[in-house]
Image (spheres, rainbow, N blue to C red):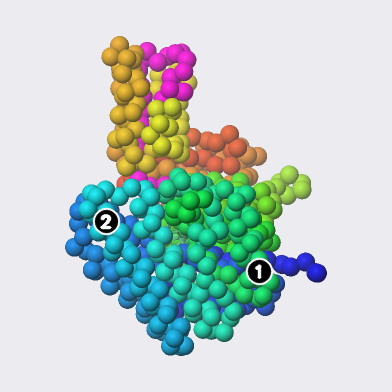
Amino acid sequence: MPEQKTLIMKFGGTSVGSAEALVSAIQIIRDAKKDWDRVVVVTSAMSGVTNLLLDSAASASHGKVDSLPAAESALREKHFAAADALIKNEKLREQTKAEINALILSLVDLCKAIAVLGEASPRAMDAVASLGERMSVYLLGAVVNDAGIKAKAIVSTEFVVTNAHYQNAHPDFKATTEKTRGLLNPLMDEGIIPITTGFIGATPEGAITTLGRGGSDYSAAIIGAVLPADDVWIWTDVDGVMTTDPRIVPEAVTLPEINYSEIAELAYYGAKVLHPKTIRPVLDAGIGLRICNTFNPSHPGTRLIASIKSNGKVEGKVIKAVTAIRKQRLITIEGRGMLGVPGVAARAFGAVASTGTSVPLITQASSEQSICFAVPSELAPTVLSSLEKAFAVEIEDDDIDRVWATEDVSIITVVGAGMRHTPGVSGRVFSKLGNDGVNVLAIAQGSSEVSISLVVDAVDTENAVKALHELIVAS
Ligand code: ADP
Ligand code: ASP
Ligand code: MG
C-alpha cells in the first residue's frame, strides 16, 4: 500500500466559537481532505465555555448556585444557535442538541454536589471542565457530517490515557498509542474523519482528567505523535506566531518561520498562541507543526523549522519576539547569614516544590545574600509560609532576615536564537527600557542564550512590551 499522509488539525475556542467560525472550519476540513489521505480533527470547547464552567464550579464550592440557571441558558444558547444554524437534518440536529443538553444537565448535578460538599476537588474540577470539549465535539461532528463530510465524534477519554494528576495530567504514551491506533485507524481506513476532544483524557480507571488550561494544542501533539502523523496544524484566531501579542501591540507581525528553541521559550514565557507542552512530542516524533488562522485560511501562518541553517547562522532578526507573563510575584529570601552556607538554595526550592509550584524565573546575586524567584501570584502566600516553615531556625537565629513577596509583577521575555552569536543585545534591551522609563526589578538569561527575561511592575507590562517590540521593528 502506498504511504498514507496523515494530518492532525486542532481548532481553538474562537475557531469553533460561533456558526460563522464553524463554517470556516468546515471548509478547512473539506479542503484538507483533498490533500491528505487521513485527517484527524481535535476541537477545543467553544470560546468562553471552559471559563464559564470553571467559574460555576468555583461559585458552587462557596455554596453559591444561584448563577447556575444563567450559566445553563448561556451554554444552551451558544451551542444550540450554532446547531440550529448549521445542522439541516432535523433528526441529527435534535439528537445533537439532546446530547449537549445532557452534558449541561450534568454540569448542574456536579455543581449541586460541589455546593453540598462545600469544596471542589481537582478531580471534580476536571469533570466540570471536560464538559466544554464534550459539548463542542458533538456539535462539530454533527455540522461536519451534515455538510456531507464523513466524520465521527469520539471523546478522547476513550484513548488518551493519563496519570491521576488532575488539572495537569501527564499522558501515558504507551497506553495512549495502543488505544489511539486501535480506535482511530479503523475509522480512517474507511475514509471517516475522527473528530475528537482536545484538553481531556482519562486515568486507566476511567476518571476524567485534563491536561492543563490551553491543553488542546498538547492533545493534538499527543495524537500526532502516537499515530504517528506527518503534520499537526493549530488553527487559531491570529495569523500564526507573531512578534508579540497583537492584543498589546496591534502592529505585531507574523513570523513565517520559527525554530524549536524559540517557540519553546515563547510558549513557556506566555505566548498563549501555543501550549508549551505541544512542542516536545512533535519534536521527538519529527512531525511538522504549523500555526494558522481559521479566519484567514489562505495565509501560510507560521511553520516550525529545524534550529540552525547549515552555515551556522540563524536567519532573520536577532530579537524575534517579545512575550509577557502577568500575575507573578517575586519572592526574596535575604540575610547576611546565608553567605556561603551550602544547601540554602536546595532547601528553598525544595520548600517551593513541596507546594506543587513551578518557578518560571530565578536570580541570585553573587554575594549569596539573597535568592529571588518568581511564582504565580495566587500561589505566593502558600509558598511564603512553606519557606518560613523550612527556614524557621535560620529566621529565629537571624541568619535569614526576611522572606517576602512583591506586589504583582510581570515577566517580560525577548526571544531570538540569533542572540547567541550577537554581542550587546542585553545592552540594547536595557537601554531601551531605561529610555522609555520602565524600571527593571530582576533579570535572568537562560544558558541557551535564546532568551532574556526581565521582571517589571505589573503597571509597566504594556509599556515594556511596546518598547521592546520597537527594538524588533528597528533592527
Ligand atoms: P485558541 O483558542 O485558538 O487556542 P488562544 O487564545 O489560546 O487561542 O491563543 C491565541 C491568542 O494568543 C491570540 O489571539 C493572541 O492574542 C495570543 N497571543 C499571545 N502572544 C502571541 C504571539 N506571540 N503570537 C500570536 N498570538 C499571541
Ligand atoms: N478549553 C480548554 C481551555 O480553555 C482547552 C483549550 O482551549 O485548549 O483551557
Ligand atoms: Mg489556546
428 with respect to 290 (left or right): left
Q: Is residue 74 above or below residue 337?
A: below
Per the rendered image, the range of residues in magenta is: 325-348
Real-space Cα separation, disc 1 to disc 2, in angstroms: 39 Å
Quarter residue 457 falls in:
top left
Residue in the foreground of this view, choosing between 151 and 17: 151
Residue at 39% over, 72% down: 100
Residue 329 within the segment the image draws in magenta:
yes
Q: Amino acid at mark 2?
A: Ala
> Dots 1 and 2: beta carbons under 8 Å?
no
Residue at 55% over, 36% down: 446
Secondary structure at numbered mark 2:
helix
Image coords of residue 106 (percent x, y): 33, 65
Q: Which residue is mark 2?
A: 113
Q: Residues within 10 Å of mark 2 (few under 14, many from 20)?
A: some
Name the residue at the front extreme: 205
Q: Residue 186: which disc?
A: 1
Secondary structure at numbered mark 1:
helix
Residue in the foreground of this view, choosing between 46 and 305: 46
Residue at 44% over, 64% down: 133
Residue in the foreground of this view, choosing between 298 and 32: 32
Q: Is residue 322 visible?
A: no
Mark closest to the chain's N terminus, 1 or 2: 2
Name the residue at the right extreme: 1
Residue 220 within the segment the image draws in magenta:
no
Quarter residue 3 falls in:
bottom right
Q: Amino acid at mark 1?
A: Pro
Residue at 28% over, 72% down: 73
Q: Residues within 10 Å of mark 1 (few under 14, many from 20)?
A: few
